[in-house]
Image (tube, helix red, strand yellow):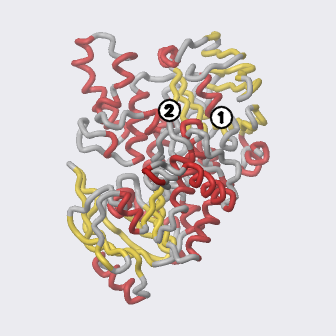
Amino acid sequence: MQEKDVLSLAKNDSGDYILEFRNVSKKFPGVQALSNVNFGIRRGTVHVLIGENGAGKSTLLKVINGLYKADTGQILFNGGEINLNGPSEALKAGISMIYQELNIIPEMTVLENIYLGREMMKRFGRIDHKTMYKNAREFLDRQGLQRYDLNRRMKDLSVAEAQMIEIVKAISVNAKVILMDEPTSSLTEKEVDYLFSKISELKAAGISIVFISHKMDEIFRVADYTTVFRDGAHIKTQKASETSIPEIIEMMVGRKMTEVYPKKDTAVGDEVFKIENFTRYGVFEGVNISLKRGEILGVSGLVGAGRTEIMRAVIGLDPHDEGKIYLEGEEISFRDVNDSIDAGIIMIPEDRRRFGLNLVQSVGENVSLVAHRHVLKSVLVKHRRLRKIISEMIKLLAIKTPSIETKVETLSGGNQQKVVLGKWLTVKPKILIMDEPTRGIDVGTKYEIYKLMHQMNAEGVSIIMVDSDLEELLGMSDRVVIINSGRVAGELEGGEVSAEAVMRLAV
């Protein structure tokens, strides 16, 4: 079937479209992000966009939402062409968006973020905080979200909690279309269940949901229709009930993939790292974790269990009150995170945009940030070697970028994650802590990162993988430690490891 026939065939099917795309194209310097995209979104349905990072999915949502302008083509909304100048115009038109990377103001409160850009006003231009608080409290209570404190600052929330506030904000504006870019990437299973129940309610009310996800189980759980993108081009639109995971993956990557997780050939060695009685009062207590050379140690637990907090304290980013750290048999301590970097203990953060990248800088500048201080000691050596190091990392990680001068903010989520990884690999770590390493990354890019993890294992690097994705945790870990309420609830290895066993200990 030709791409140009998809829209006309769909029209013959129902003709009831709330959004239509006709020959929509968008180009950035060196990158054709969208190429003559043609398909439609039916009213009152959930339509999932699927594709590798950089395939054009998020770009299309940002074009719909007015963040980007299409170079050519038309977008029809409710039968009429729209040409929006920013998200505020989109919101007024009835289009709301949840972004893949949190779109929050950290210093503002939950209440202020929910009403950002649409504050209620009193006479003389004063903000009506009292009415806003009353309405927001009633709305959250109706949604079953009583636990959220509206006066709490966004910077004090976990990534999952902040994502839930973004979801609440999007569904509170009575939109006709809600665009959701990876809304579940940092949510627990319980929170995902909540979101999907809300999606069902919205759909029943005639609201259309355009949803991006890299999690195949979610796609078939929530989608009425799917559209696959590859390299900016629309590949196929069809009913979710008429496709399958293998077919979708083949269309995404342009080839058949016979396995999701690569096989590991490296044998696990002796203990190389451990923490004993690691404690931060009120956060985690008496934590004992050991790590072997060439091992991938999975760390599981519900959001809020203390997984990330333990790892931040290990590298000296946060304080701890008691406990010891041993590296290669010797006790070590860190005054700050620079000491842990010098010791070869590195942590890749969960929220890459807030803690892993400088978005306004280039790919080259981001990759070289750590190398400047910890690898290249001489100014002369810097000038000779820096560009070589950057080029090697771009090649090793297959980072898709027009050049090393390209700003990181223009890259896809998966390529941004590769830049973070490349930055830290320049210091040749001994211990690599990866917090949600493939969050918001497509199946093809995930496979590349999995292979790289095994390659690092073969070179003697040991990895701690903090992960909410149970399937990934089971597919990649040699051993799994489960954290529950700031304590180690159990450890599983070999035949003991199963989704049921992990969840039983986690809850």
Question: Could you tell me if residue 51 is visible in this image?
Answer: yes
Q: Position of residue 483 (x, y in %)?
A: 72, 36
Q: Position of residue 384 (x, y in %)?
A: 22, 18
- Say which residue appears at 41% left-offset and 47% top-offset: 413
| Extreme-bottom residue of the structure | 12
Q: Which mark is residue 348?
A: 2
Q: Quadrant of residue 263?
A: top right
Q: Quadrant of residue 238?
A: bottom left
Which quadrant would the N terminus be assigned to in this image?
bottom left
Residue 170 vertical placement versus 288 (above, below)? below
Q: Amino acid at mark 2?
A: Ile
| Extreme-front residue of the structure | 124
Q: Is residue 474 left or right of residue 253?
A: right
Question: Could you tell me if residue 254 is visible in this image?
Answer: no
Residue named by callout 1: 307
Q: CA distance from mark 1 to mark 2?
A: 14 Å
Q: Which mark is residue 147?
A: none
Report crowding for label 2: few under 14, some 14 to 19, many 20 or more residues within 10 A (C-alpha). Answer: many
Q: Is residue 475 left or right of residue 36?
A: right
The secondary structure type at the circle numbered 1 is helix
- Say which residue appears at 45% left-offset and 78% top-offset: 42
**Earlier residue among tags 1 and 2:** 1
